[in-house]
Image (cartoon, rainbow, N blue to C red):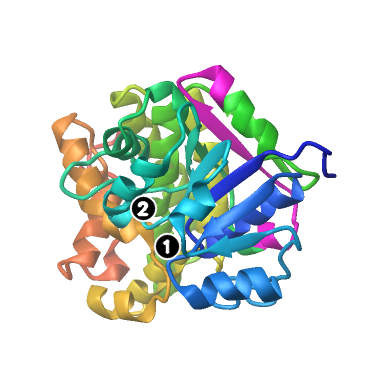
Amino acid sequence: MQSTDKPRVAVIGAGSWGTTFAKVLAEGGASTVVWARRPEVAREITETKRNSDYLPGINLPRTLTASTSLEQVLDGASQVYVSVPSQTLRSNLSAIRALLAPDVPVVSLMKGVEKGTGLRMSEVLLEGLGIDQDRIAVASGPNLALEIARRQPTAAVVSSSSAETASAVAAVATNPYFRSFINTDVIGTEFGGVLKNLIAVAIGIVDGVGYGENTKASIITRGLAEMTDFAVSLGAQPSTLSGLAGLGDLIATCQSPLSRNNTAGRLLGQGYRFDEVVRQMDQTAEGLASVAPILELAAANGVDMPIVGQVAEVLAGRLDPRNIAPHLTETDEPQGE
């Protein structure tokens, strides 16, 4: 499983997804170092090969290490993977920029849009790092961290405006249980990862209310239509939303209790207020932070997103969660599917 000439890669972020992806990379043969903000997390990963706060019960590869020193983590890295909460990304980039070696690809593992700017994570990386667009890639797909940490087989898509960069990243981010495909539709790949979180919150809401499979299937199906209309309006290819980064990720996120966005929605459906949900969640549910900027972008591009709009109303406390299900359209007039 490991080559004799192992690439050295860095992962910025030691949460559940950052640690899991570091495990994927290490078990694919890469020499992998993780940057952790907290010294105790870095020490636990390095010394005991565990990250009990985020991946309880999971043994990490012996070759995986961690540090709180960005300089140490980035030194000699041939690829850099970034997995920090989307709303804190920009504040982390100045320190990374000063240490980033020329021509090293930077891979976003994040699924969100920046509040205030509406920028995708690759666009924030582009601005904050000042590097060529062809050096940036994004990875997305049906990737629930704990399942992958348990080596349950799955696939992902790596996207970059440069097919060469996408291929180079995919070659490293592949192992016997994790397979990376490639495309050059960065817009569609990123928005698939963002938008499915919003639909997963809606599914969680109706789950919390107690509605059944018909309701959830209707929301997933119409939610995919909303996702596609939105992404295409901003330049995505519709086929991307039918692939791993769209439909694949949507299915996994909507149906799994491991999904943070599904969990957040379920608490809302059970009657908890938005602020109470945020307090109860020990990890970031990116969908909650992305609702407002996505609706702003949708309005600016003339795209109707009734399901996401109803999620926003529930978050604001203006809509009873039990009333979300009928609101699959914004009119009572019959419409084409």
At which x and y percent is residue 19? Answer: 58, 60
Magenta stretch, residue numbers: 147-165
Instruction: Please give the name of the residue rendered at 63% of the width and 76% of the height, measured from the top-left corner.
Output: 56
- Disc 1: which residue: 261
| Residue at x-position 47% and y-position 64% | 68
Q: Nearer the viewer, residue 27 or 325?
A: 27
Is 221 left or right of 123, judged from the image as shown? right
Dot 1 alpha-carbon crowd within 10 angstroms: few under 14, some 14 to 19, many 20 or more: many
One can see residue 94 in this view: yes
Q: Quadrant of residue 268?
A: bottom left
Amino acid type assigned to the residue bearing label 1 in the image:
Asn
CB atoms at circles 2 and 1 under 8 Å apart?
yes
Q: Is residue 183 magenta?
A: no
Badge 2 or badge 1: first in the primary sequence: 2
Left-right relation of 173 to 327: right
Which corner quadrant holds the N terminus?
Answer: top right
Q: CA distance from mark 2 to mark 1?
A: 8 Å
Residue underneath mark 2: 198
Q: Position of residue 37 (x, y in %)?
A: 43, 67
Identify the secondary structure beneath mark 2. Answer: helix
Secondary structure, mark 1, is: helix
- Residue type at mark 2 is Leu
**Residue closer to the observer: 164 or 80:** 80
